[in-house]
Image (cartoon, helix red, strand yellow):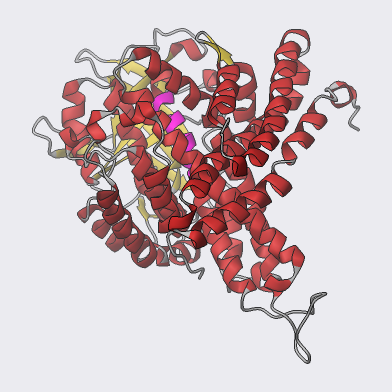
Amino acid sequence: MPNYTAPLDDMLFLFEKLRDNKNYNELEKYNEVNSDLVKDILGEAAKISENLILPLALSGDENPAQLENGVVRTPPGYKEAYNKYIEDGWISLSCDPKYGGQGMPKTVSAFFDEMLSSASLSFKLYSELTIGAYNCLLRHATDEMKDKYLPKMVEGKWSGTMCLTEPICGTDLGMLKTKAVEQKDGTFKISGQKIFITSGDHDLTENIIHLVIARASDSPTGTKGISLFLVPKYIVNEDGSIGQRNGVSTGSVEHKMGIKGSATCVLNFDEAVGYMIGPKNKGLNQMFTMMNLERIVVGIQGLGISEIAYQNSLSYAKERKQGKTNNSKSINGSDLIIEHADIRRSLLNMKSIIEGERALCFWLSQQTEVSLYHSDEKIKQEASDYVSLMTPVVKSLFTDLAMEITSDAMQIHGGYGFTKDQGIEQLYRDNRITPIYEGTNSVQAADLVFRKLINKNGDIINKFIETIKFETNSKNEKLKTFSKELNNYVDILSKFSDWIKDRHVNDKDDVSAAANDYLKTLGFVSLAYAWIKVLEVSYKDYDSNKKFYDDKINTAKFFFEKVLPRAEFHYKSAISGSSNIMNFKFN
């Protein structure tokens, strides 16, 4: 089983030193969320992640969730851990105090999301979808509905799901077949089948609150006719008690490559009682509240799995001896593999990406809070646009790079990485779903280039580019080398953006073919932007913690020299166009 230690020093560094968003700091609701409080919360979060949840990773992989006589059984140890988890209030961390939550901002809860992802993604998914459903209900349900369902969900006694995909439709939700027939009492009878439903059924909670998209019998075809419904596993009585079983049943639990401890279910809805959330035919917009936040969290999953893969690779490289280096001082024996240049390159590649991702995620967390709670509508909208722009980047880049990092981790471990002994191959398998679910990474890239660069509020990508230029124009001489290098790649991103906009008018196949490359160019430049923020603090506060800041500066140097140049490669690859791709004749 892999070992794991939560990277508290780096997390607390970000919280204490990089809360540089003026608009975020104007949010009065978080005035009391200070460094001492966050240090205490993250310290306890580290303990539960390392001691309670980490051992569940192996248990879930060896004893997958399964359907027995109509009941979905979770792996050994899950029930006990879940009960302790909700007893200590961890599900409620970022929830509204009005419904029993602790009201912590995403600048704090995102760190816990990362820890849980490192410790056991399978276990995390049982509560993660509950928070997603909570967020959707919080923003779109009636007060009566929120009062009835949210307190139990925040407590963790009830869980939640997101039910979109059907056998004939995944991304193209306009093809859905699930029907909703209105009843005289204002409820709906929901009938249809949903597949790939994460935490769709299990034995951890008293009730499961399904959020289901369906088409009302009098609604138009396509995405314009989709509505959103709350469909509980058990009907909830007027007094809040649990009543009779609803018409929801589990057809099967998927047998998967990874995250085996998570119950991924086929759910059958047979005239199940459902309650419409929000206006009819606006269900897709409402569900996207849940999906967009979830996509950021999926990116954090990739970050968390990358972190534990890196930690174990570093530890192994410090213990494993193999061969001699060019400058070997060993006379009779072999050198530790960490002395080999290629191993060091792999480890620094992991480290520089992971720490850049964590810093970028912290920046995005601040923007998210501003987009939700700032009193100035203009400021709120600008932050919302940045969140919209960066959501597909974080979801796709972080998870794609996690595949690279977990693969490199297996390579560093050699033959031991390919066996189950070290647990490294499980990290690779568990992460493999992250580029797929919540919208595949190719769908995310298409969403970025066709919908996110420019919207009704203007040219978002150019605003972001100007923000980078303004905020990285430092007077610190030591930082100027990095800033100059970043500006070169910002210019490449700007040219790439102009090319995309031009091809959007003249040849959409070129845009489609370039989408993944564009996302990665934007992603690597964004990571460099986050690194500049880290470097600014590192040079300014250098004397206060020389060892820590030396590490940051040298890691950043590797990123700028060895990782950031990938941005130009993707640009050059993309602008070759799509003619060869589209004209190629497959036999």
Which picture quadrant has residue 336?
A: bottom right
Residue displayed at 51% across by 8% down: 456
Whether residue 294 is in magenta: the answer is yes
Magenta region, main secondary structure: helix
Residue displayed at 31% across by 38% down: 105
158 left or right, relative to 74? left
- Magenta residues, as a range? 288-301
User: Residue reaching furthest bottom?
Assistant: 332
* Residue 542 pos. (x, y %): 49, 53
Whether residue 371 is in magenta: the answer is no
337 left or right, relative to 242? right
Screen quadrant of the C terminus: top right
Residue 124 in view, yes or no:
no
* Residue 533 pos. (x, y %): 52, 39
Q: Nearer the viewer, residue 302 or 191?
A: 302
* Residue 202 pos. (x, y %): 35, 50
Residue displayed at 58% across by 44% down: 399
Residue 446 in view, yes or no:
yes
271 left or right, relative to 408? left
Q: Nearer the viewer, residue 92 or 307?
A: 307
Residue displayed at 55% across by 45% down: 535
164 left or right, relative to 273? right
Q: Is residue 540 above or below residue 216?
A: below
